[in-house]
Image (cartoon, grey):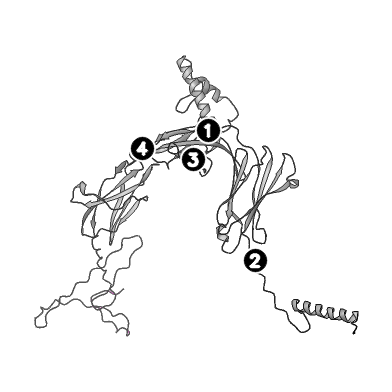
Amino acid sequence: MSVIRRSSVRSALAAALFMALASFIPLSGCGVKADPEPPAAEVKPVPRLDGLSARGQGGKITLRFKAAPAELEDAVVAGFRVYRKDWAEGANPEQAQVLMMADLVLEAGKEAEIQSFQDNYIEAGKHYEYHLFAYNAKKTLGPDNTLGPFVADFPEKAPEGFGARSENGVAVIFWNTPDVKQRNVQSAANALAEAQGQPVTAALPGQSAAPAAEEKADEASPEAAPASSGPKLNLYRAEGKEGPYDPKPINAEPALGGEFRDNKVSLGLEIRYRAREVREENGVVMEGPFTEEIALVVEDKTPPQAPDVLWVKALEKGVRIRWSPVQDPALLGYRVERKKASDPDTAFADISGIVTVDEFTDRKVTEKAEYAYRVTAKDRGGNQAQSAAMVVDFPPPEPVEPAPLPTENAEGAPAAVALPVAGQPAEQPAEKAEEKKTPPDEAKPAAPAAPKAPALPPPSEGGPKPVEGLPLP
């Protein structure tokens, strides 16, 4: 019987384990080179944000933003983060707490779309500041984009006196301002005073103050503060009796001054409006409650002013017309019409369609004739006004070349002229008489001898030659 020693078994197991590990672990050093690691992928920059805006309604703030399109070609964005600082009135902003409000991960292919985030945790009277960042796939943040700081101060009341009227194809929206209120109070007081036979105590536009008021005006008094333009408004519009309201206001900037003219409405259709008062601070817009809804139908039965044709000019390949622009908020554009001058007015035909500029070139005219042109202004209500016709010959007459001045004498040398005097009209040199060619077989009558100039030495070769009978300068 053979005896196997424990030490031999241990050695065999150790050798087998070593070979098994060596087959899985790559060798380094000892003259054996490992495969090189692939190079790290190039990290693209993170873009800044564009179209950053904030609008608050009902105690909530909605942020809108997107990655800058101009930077997306060379940059990459995988998502956005929204941070917020807030602090109470009188506190140190540097010690304000910072909260991460959102981490918005983008879906593939939506890098250029507008993103939005709504902050529902707003307290009136507190200070806020937002910081927005884009980041890439490695969570590397891009540039800081800041909104604010601002105080959460939402208007509490809807604007007063909100209404609208139709005026020449335009919806005129109005609301009360301090000036309007003051004029209404003065107007009522003056009407009551006049009914009671008492003097008017306050001057209105177009009226003169009573003598007592004039005397008081002469007395020394501090200058009155300029009248306030009143609240700023965002205006919202819906078309039809049940059409939805556009979530965006129709005014690009908050409207002020008590009036806004909306010239982008559909005529003959019911239009509905409502509005919110607006307060702005550092790019953040805060809106108050809505006004009651108002509705109206906008019509236009007043024609625009007729344009004046300033000139009509025949060109080599067409006719150019220019006219005076018409100032009308409901103007749709102009139509240029043409006919032969000898035809009746019923022959006028539209050659331009509706154009919105005050100049047109007729490239389709080809036949030689006398033509008449006129311009018609048209508004969105279909009302029209025509200009007077203006006549032009086409094509233009050939330009007449001016007769060349005689600069050479009969032998090709420069003609002698009198030296001009400054300040005096220039004299035209006498035209050179055209030589009449006589057939060689015809006898030519002898001309009387002309006085000859003194003989001159022969000129140098290549220079001008003296001419007999002409004085030399």
Label at residue 43: 2
- Binning the other alpha carbons within 10 Å of mark 3 as few (below 14), some (14 to 19) or many (20 upward) gives some
- Figure disc tally: 4
The type of residue carrying mark 2 is: Val
Magenta stretch: includes residue 347: no
**With respect to residue 455, does 328 lie above or below?**
above
Sequence-first disc among 2 and 4: 2
The type of residue carrying mark 4 is: Asp
Magenta stretch: includes residue 466: yes
Decide if residue 397 is on the left or right side of residue 110.
left
The type of residue carrying mark 1 is: Thr
> Residue sitting at 64 percent across and 37 percent down?
153
Quote the CA–CA distance across marks 1 and 4. Answer: 27 Å
Sequence-first disc among 2 and 3: 2
Label at residue 264: none
Give the residues drawn in magenta, as a range: 452-473
Q: Position of residue 340 (x, y in %)?
A: 21, 53
Q: Residue furthest front?
A: 1
Secondary structure under the numbered disc 4 in the rendered image: loop
- Binning the other alpha carbons within 10 Å of mark 1 as few (below 14), some (14 to 19) or many (20 upward) gives some
Sequence-first disc among 1 and 4: 1
Secondary structure under the numbered disc 2 in the rendered image: loop
Q: Position of residue 237 (x, y in %)?
A: 47, 39
In the picture of the structure, the residue carrying the numbered disc 3 is 245
Label at residue 291: 1
In the picture of the structure, the residue carrying the numbered disc 4 is 300
Quote the CA–CA distance across marks 3 and 1. Answer: 14 Å
Decide if residue 430 is on the left or right side of residue 439.
right
Indicate the quadrant containing the N terminus: top left, top right, bottom left or bottom right.
Answer: bottom right
Comparing labels 1 and 4, the label whose residue is closer to the camera: 1
